[in-house]
Structures are given as structure tokens and as C-alpha cells.
Amino acid sequence: MIASEPTGEIRPGIFRPDWSVATSAATRQALHGRIAARTGLLDRWCHRLEADEDAVWRTTMQLYGVCGRPPEFGDIAVASGISPERVPTILRTLQSHDLVALAPACEQIRLAYPFTVAITGHRVTLNGHTLHALCAIDALGVADMYGADVAISSPCNRCAETIHVKTAAKGRALRSFSPPGAVVWYDFAYDGNASTSCCPAIAFFCSDQHLQQWLEARTARPEGIRLTPDEALEVGRAIFGPVLKRQLANRNTAGY
């Protein structure tokens, strides 16, 4: 980590984005562009949480990955050791950081990046469950976040041809990606809520030609960057890999 590469400490010694996985110039450009274009994003997404907030966030994400659905508030309380009365309040605080979003009655989780209960087209198979990711980068970040390889299927944002992705090395590499000319558009738009601003435009395209056609069809050219599959995977890893980093290290040390 160097001064020109801004990060936020989400818990002691754990930073995101993780610049160490950004090996290509395009990946670093994408991460810098994301931070520069999205005013306040680093403060919101990489804000160092209080201990109870961090425990509820990590527990929410762990249970989401294990169960394949948003966890109930009571389950979060039991698994985190936080009192059931405090969990809803903490989740509302996490919502203010755009880390989760609650249903209007605030009794259920409707999204917790990278996942959502909405049908987005970005289907991720993790631990035997099929979940919906909010965007292409979120889908690609899932494997490294959970230390478990995934399969992804998602439509081309221009023609709807299905793009298929499989990861290797617990999300640190791509095993396969088809069609071979597929690319990812990483959009920088941000209005304080990633799920409604940038996420709908962060998408797979089956070819550079279809990406270019999509860009030309916009009334105003969106701000963002075209990424190869490997570059997009690095962006996903940099953003989501740190979230459960300590838990995965503890699991591996215990021999699980």
C-alpha cells in the first residue's frame, strides 16, 4: 500500500480495496477511477466499523454464503453474540454505509453486497446454492471473498447471450470464461447507493463490439472502463476479498 493508492481500514489490519491483487494497469485504473468518481465512497464502504457493527456485518455475510439467502435477524444475533434488540439498529447503521439494505419495514435484509434477493441475471453458484449478485464485479468477487470457487452465468448486456464463468484457486484465478471474447464494463456512476446507480451498468458483454454498441446507444457516454475477464476478477477480489479475510485465515489455520 502506498500513498497514491487510497484505502480504508475496515477492521484493524484489514484494508480495502486490496491493492496487492491489482497486478494490471487497467485494474489499478479501475480502482482509482472508482474512488475518484464516487465522491465519499471510500468513507462509506471502507469506513472502520465499531466492533459490534463489524461483528454483525461479517456474520451477515458468513450466514448469507452458508445458507444461500439473507439471514434472519435472530440468526445474526445468535451467531454474532450481539443481543437481538441491538441487531436491527446495527443493521440500519450498516445501511447508512451502503453495505446492506433493509426491506421498507426494516425487518428483513434485501441486499448485502455482493448479494441481493432481487433477480438481477448475475447468477452465482456458491456452496451448492444459487444466489443473485448485484453486478458483474460483485459476482466475480464472491469466490475470493468466501475462499470457495464459484460458477457464474450472466447475460450479455447487449444481446442477452449467456456468459459462463468458473473460478479456480478459491477465486484467485479464472478456470474458464466463455465466450472467449467476453469483456466487462465497470461503471463509475455513484449517487450514494451502488445498487441503484453503478450496479445496473456494471455488466458482462459477449464481445467488444457489443460493448461499443451499448456505449454508443447511451444518450451520454457513461464514465467507466472496459476490463478483460482477468482484470475484472482482480477488481472483484480487491473490493470483496478483504471482507472475510480474517475469518478465512482462522478457518484455514484450524484445518477446516
Image: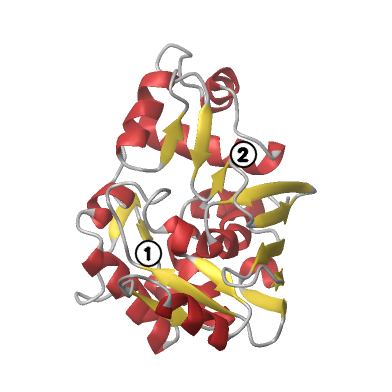
Q: Give the amino acid at mark 1.
A: Pro
* Residue labelled with disc 1: 17
Closer to us: 216 or 64: 216
Closer to us: 217 or 40: 217
Q: How many marks?
A: 2
Closer to us: 88 or 241: 88
Residue 22 shows in the view? no
The percent position of residue 203, horizontal first and vertical second, equals 53, 67
The correct choice, above or below, for 89 with respect to 143 in the image is above
The percent position of residue 5, horizontal first and vertical second, equals 26, 74
Using the rendered view, name the quadrant where residue 57 is placed.
top left
The kind of secondary structure element at disc 1 is loop
Q: Give the amino acid at mark 2.
A: Tyr
Please tell me which residue is depicted at 57% across the width and 17% down the height of the picture.
74
The percent position of residue 146, horizontal first and vertical second, equals 62, 54
Please tell me which residue is depicted at 29% across the width and 73% down the height of the picture.
33
* Residue labelled with disc 2: 64
